[in-house]
Image (cartoon, helix red, strand yellow):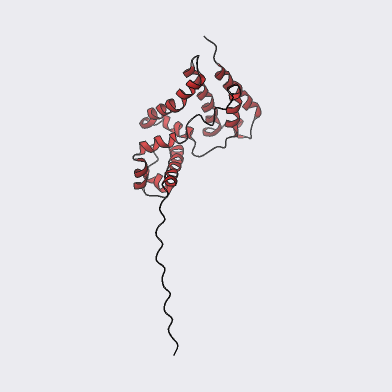
Amino acid sequence: MAQRKSPPRRRPAAAPRPRDAEQTRSEILHAARVLFATRGYANAGMREIAAAAGITPALVVRYFGSKRDLFIAAIESDIGLGPFLGPDRATVGRHIARYFFSKPMREADTLSILLHAAGEPEVCDLATELLAARVIQPLARWLGPPRAEARAALLLAIISGTWLFRQALPMRAFTGGPDTALASCMAAQIQHVVDGLPEA
């Protein structure tokens, strides 16, 4: 009589892999940035952000607390002067223009988040404060006198204005490939501001 084969032993279920905290935080920030940039603060809900990150809303709250705190973190994660200021002050205009025109357009651009925030009273003042603290004031210190803060604001206006018509409201002049003539013009304007404005 043939012996019965004993059924194969089942392997114990693998324990769920622990979630990597830094990766989770990064995924939440990316999801939040995309939604804040494309839908605005008011229309980007915590549940929607959580779904885009593939987690539960409770985890979003655990990592960031509130939607307002998440908004601050989303802006602060990608705002600063590092990529813009080159090593040589005398050629910083060319450096910024080259960086700007070679930078690929992104769905989660910080300027898109700030543009949406400009029309949302709940976070407009907050966005302005963050921009002043993280961009205008450090840039003014780097520029030095005369009229450092005014020159910093003017530089931001040149860069963000060009960005607006390149990405948010694209004009034909900015939608093609790299335009060396436009880049040179932008570089000259930036360098002029960096080098100082004549006294009125």
Residue 98 locus on image (x, y percent): 61, 30
In x, y percent, where is residue 95?
A: 59, 28
The residue at 40%/44% (across/down) is 49
Residue most extreme to the bottom: 1
Residue 172 rendering spot, x and y as whole percentages = 60, 32
Asked whether 184 or 164 is in front, the reply is 184
The residue lying at 43 percent from left, 86 percent from top is 3
Q: Quadrant of residue 196?
A: top right
Q: In the picture, which quadrant includes the N terminus?
A: bottom left
Of residues 2 and 152, the one drawn nearer to the viewer in this rendering: 2
Q: Residue furthest top?
A: 200
The image shows a total of numbered marks equal to 0
* Front in this rendered view, residue 4 or 159: 4
Q: Residue at x 44, y 28 (%)?
A: 134
* Residue 90 versus residue 25 in the image, above or below: above
Percent x, y for residue 93? 59, 24
